[in-house]
Each structure stands twice: as structure tokens, then as C-alpha cells.
Amino acid sequence: MTRQQAEATGLVTGVDPAADKGCSTTKLRASTVGSESTVFFDGASGVVAIDVRGTSVRTPEGVHVGSSGAGMRKACPDWTPASDPNPDNARGVALAPGSNGKAEYNISVVNFLELQVRPHHCYE
């Protein structure tokens, strides 16, 4: 989805047109203080990630901010740690079902849940 298409949905606010030539972020309109959700844009790919910090959003598999490590592993058995291999305090990735390998969840069990394009070059 391009920056223009994302803006046309009315779900994002104030995307910097510079995102068309590099990487930029904006907030989802539904974000609230303490549970801000960020959308990452890349000029070449459009929307490359949606980062959720609130507890109200869940993946189709039921994973959400605050899920236990055991619950997350059960819902996403292909989860691979990016840091500490202990799923109770680690961050890692799992392929998003139905994405044909083009999207993955970036999951930090305690802090955030993110759906991101695979691969991208805006961060990490």
C-alpha cells in the first residue's frame, strides 16, 4: 500500500511526503496515549510495518501484547528468537500465515506486536 493509499483510508495522520523517497513513520488515528501504534513507510514498498503497543490488538492466532511466552509459542510455533532465546522475555519473528513468506510478525512478548514486510530496510 502506498503512502497515498494509506492516507486515503483515513486511518493514518500526517505522513511526511518524504516517505516517498525513503523511510518515514506516522501514527494510526485510533492510537491512544500509552498505546500508540506506528505505521512505517518506505518509498519503494509503501507500508512496510505496523507496530502495535496497546493490548487491544490481537493477531488472528490470538497473540497480543502481554501474551505469555508459552501462549505465543503455541500460537506461532515457527517463532525464532532475535535475541534472548527465552520466549518469556525475548523478541523474535514468526511468518504471518497466508502471507506466502512476504510478511512476518515481529513479537516482543512483553512490549509490542508488529506486522512487517519481509524483507524491508527501514530499521533493524
Image: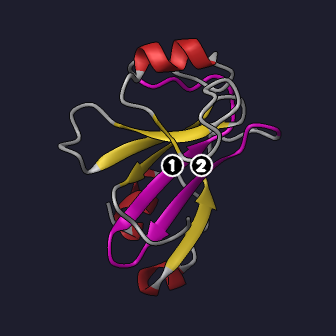
Residue that label 1 marks: 50
Along the line of sight, the residue nearer the viewer: 18 or 63: 63
What residue lies at 36% left-to-right and 67% top-to-bottom? 46
Q: What percent of the width, then of the height, locates residue 35?
A: 74, 37
Please check the rendered image and state whether residue 41 is part of the magenta-colored stretch, yes or no.
Answer: yes
Instruction: Classify residue 6 as left or right of residue 63.
Output: left
- Please tell me whether mark 1 sits on a helix, a strand or a loop: strand
Q: What percent of the width, then of the height, locates residue 14?
A: 61, 67
Q: What percent of the width, then of the height, locates residue 24?
A: 56, 73
Label 2 close to label 1 by CB (< 8 Å): yes
**Total label count?**
2
Vertical position of residue 26 compared to residue 88: above or below: below
What is the span of residues highlighted in magenta in the rendered image?
Answer: 34-59
What residue lies at 59% left-to-right and 35% top-to-bottom? 85
Vertical position of residue 106 compared to residue 45: above or below: above
Q: State the CA–CA distance, disc 2 to disc 1.
A: 9 Å
Residue that label 2 marks: 28
Instruction: Classify residue 6 as left or right of residue 123.
Output: left
Please check the rendered image and state whether residue 22 is part of the magenta-colored stretch, yes or no.
Answer: no
